Image (tube, helix red, strand yellow):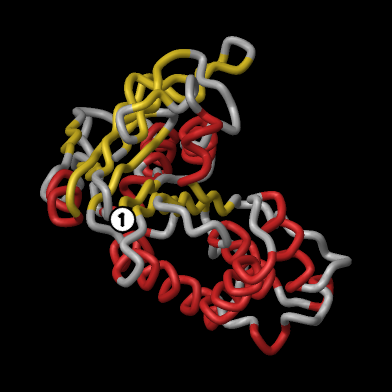
Amino acid sequence: MIEVIDLSKTYQNRQVVKGINMFIEKGEMVGLLGPNGAGKSTTISMISSLIQPTSGDVLIKGGSFHKQSKAIRSILGVVPQEIAVYHDLTARENLAFFGKIYGLKGEELKHRMESTLQLVGLEERQNDRVHTFSGGMKRRLNIAVALLHEPELIIMDEPTVGIDPQSRSHILETVKTLNQEREMTVIYTSHYMEEVEYLCDRLYIMDRGEVIASGTKDEVKGILSSNQSIKLTTEMYSPSFFNSSARSSSHFLGKSYGADLYHHRPKTRKHP
């Protein structure tokens, strides 16, 4: 359904996404995992045509998104990382507003509003103003807005950031329902390994603008397993160098996926 081809983005001579390639089949749930600053949000902003790539292309259903963006947007829903609803309106008023932007009206709009409110668990708060909502409820409304036009593909950019465990669990179960019962194709970005493990069929892991590993969960675990290690042996060492190296071993991959860096300190040499 989606093919990302040599996609790159450069800002003021700084390349933040570096020629990445991805493919996503119809009905798949694919995770895009990486630390803050890895290039995930920039990548999905290009996939969803919110920003233009410096080079490369995105094909959706065989058509170039950046050449046919208007037609392709009708099958796409985007849940941004930032809350994108009006806080002075009620949940229902927000859905009515965005529904009309999608071209929905009358009974169809009313039905879509009711079904999405039920899906995200906000039926009882639908007439309350958004500024009275918790962070998790705002994020659930964010998701409802993206689902109003019943897209074939939904892109979710870290939808559980900064929310309570109950809301997080509700969002994860909602995403599973969309994929398994409604057969939506899902791109889910996160820096929580446990989320993408729970949800996704396949993973892409990004760091510093590049895809550094991809495959099924088991394949990625194999690539980044703790069996892959580097052993450093020196005749003499500087304490400052050792301390600096030890800190570097807690880098994202080592910390999160077990790709450990072992340091072998030699025995103290006795001088005559």
- Residue type for callout 1: Met
Residue situated in front as seen by the camera: 77 or 263: 77
Q: What residue do we see at 19% from left, 48% from top?
A: 220
Quarter in which the C terminus is drawn: top left
Farthest residue to the top: give it. 13
Q: Residue at x 71, y 55 (%)?
A: 100
What is the x, y in percent for residue 229? 16, 42
Between residues 154 and 228, which one lies in front from this camera angle? 154
Determine the image quadrant of residue 177: bottom left
Q: Quadrant of residue 208?
A: top left
Percent coordinates x, y for residue 20 in the rendering: 34, 26
Image quadrant where one finds the N terminus:
top left
| Residue 154 position within the rendered picture, expressed as x and y whole percent measured from the top left | 45, 52
User: Would residue 164 appear left or right of 132 to someone viewing this image?
Assistant: left
Task: State the image coordinates of residue 238 (x, y, percent, origin top left).
Answer: 37, 31
Q: Give the side of residue 134 with respect to residue 205, left or right.
A: right
Q: Which residue is most to the bottom?
A: 124
Q: Residue at x 34, y 53 (%)?
A: 185
Left or right relative to 68: residue 227: left
Q: In the rendered view, would you say 136 is above or below 7?
A: below
As drawn, 22 above or below 217: above
Q: Which residue does the numbered mark 1 point to in the structure image?
A: 29
Q: How many marks?
A: 1
| SS for dot 1 | strand
Q: Which residue ends up furthest to the front in the rendered image?
A: 106
